[in-house]
Image (cartoon, helix red, strand yellow):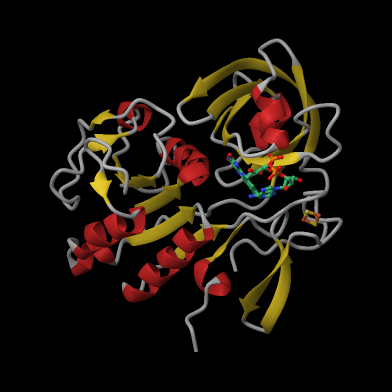
Amino acid sequence: MSAAAAPRAHRGTIHLEQGLILQHSAAAAHQHILRISAPRTARAASPGSFVHLRCDAALPMRRPLSIMRAEPAAGWIEVLYKVVGAGTAALSRRRAGETLNLLGPIGHGFEPDPARPRLIAIGGGVGIPPMVFLAERLTTDHRTNWQPLILMGSEIPFPFRTRPSRILVPAAPAGAIACMPLLDEWGVPSRLASNADYPGCFHGHVTELARRVIAALSATECAEVALCACGPTPMLAATAALAREFALPCQVSLEEYMACAVGGCAGCAVEVRTAAGRAMKRVCVDGPVFEAQAVFPPAT
Ligand SMILES: Cc1cc2nc3c(=O)[nH]c(=O)nc-3n(C[C@H](O)[C@H](O)[C@H](O)COP(=O)(O)OP(=O)(O)OC[C@H]3O[C@@H](n4cnc5c(N)ncnc54)[C@H](O)[C@@H]3O)c2cc1C
Ligand code: FES
């Protein structure tokens, strides 16, 4: 398991910061993008890691949000979140110039394998942010000639203005031409899926789009593919099944209810298959990224 951490290995790597809100913009369907000045978190963040935010002084519990972008030189991070309850609603009322107390970066993120440069990263709903981070980091990772493809699914409007991609993806189904413009600007191909009939999007689940793309690859190309996924649990399970079908390595990022988020309460523990048998792992510090087959084993 790539994400297994030695006990207390996170000590000294998670920072407590008083982050200054630099920008806070609202997107469609109660989604928001928040840019926070948090220099120590920005320096140490990696794709798949998250911050534990105090959304409001009146709320005792922090809320975990994935880091979508981190700019170490400028010292800021960005998160993308959807308002679902009291914590995220309180967060949506915070304004630029205010401060936000945060813990970060937390967790073991994605570990792309240079031997598998055709990385297909699948993000569903609020699982999109770590895939954007992964895409950005691959543009500056020169260990290999990465050829990532980012596939995003959403049943509510995407939190960015979609447009036809300028980057050709020969394996993508005809008609699936919409992209995330920021990724196109970075030279990273992306394609979008939804059951909601959005223009240029593949009609169906994002994992079905991934299946069509993989099935169109040659055996040689397929041997260079790995999957990464973040999103709702059914999407992660479908991605793990897809990985089994095509014998692909696959990492998934889990979401669990979190109290401390620093490994102290075991409230986020999940059962994982290891070489030594079943074990309980804390999603916050042992994950949130795990090998897919360890958490979604085939039915026996
Ligand atoms: C590692 C990780 C990364 C995440 N990244 C994102 C992201 O990038 N964008 C985004 O919009 N959401 C993300 N989430 C989900 C987000 O944390 C929850 O939507 C949020 O905590 C809900 O809080 P609330 O008070 O608005 O809602 P409520 O449902 O009222 O929350 C009540 C309580 O449940 C907890 N809770 C509710 N849903 C979740 C959940 N799915 N996971 C963990 N705790 C939950 C809250 O912490 C709170 O204590 C992530 C969750 C995890 C674990
Ligand atoms: S939330 Fe406390 S150990 Fe993970």
- For residue 300, above or below residue 178: below
Residue at (50%, 89%) from the top-left corner?
Answer: 300
Quadrant observed for ligand 2 in the rendered image: bottom right
Residue 132, image x and y in percent? 45, 38
Asked if residue 74 lies left or right of residue 187, the reply is right
Left or right position of 228 against 259 = left
Question: Residue drawn 63% across and 55% down?
Answer: 288
Residue 290 versus residue 206 in the image, above or below: below
Question: In this view of the protein, which residue sits in the foreground, 47 or 156?
Answer: 156
Residue 46 shows in this picture: yes
Q: Position of residue 182 (x, y in %)?
A: 37, 27
Residue extending farthest to the bottom is 300
Q: Position of residue 256 (x, y in %)?
A: 67, 56
Residue visible at 47% across and 42% down in the picture = 128
- Give whichever of 234, 273 is nearer the camera: 234
Point out the residue furthest to the top here. Answer: 97
Quadrant of the image containing the N terminus: bottom right
Relative side of 175 to 99, left or right: left
State the residue at coordinates (31%, 72%): 246
Task: Please indicate whether residue 99 sits to the left or right of residue 146 in the image.
Answer: right
Measured as percent of width and height from the top left, residue 118 is found at 32, 54
Can I make out residue 117 in this image? no
Q: How many marks?
A: 0
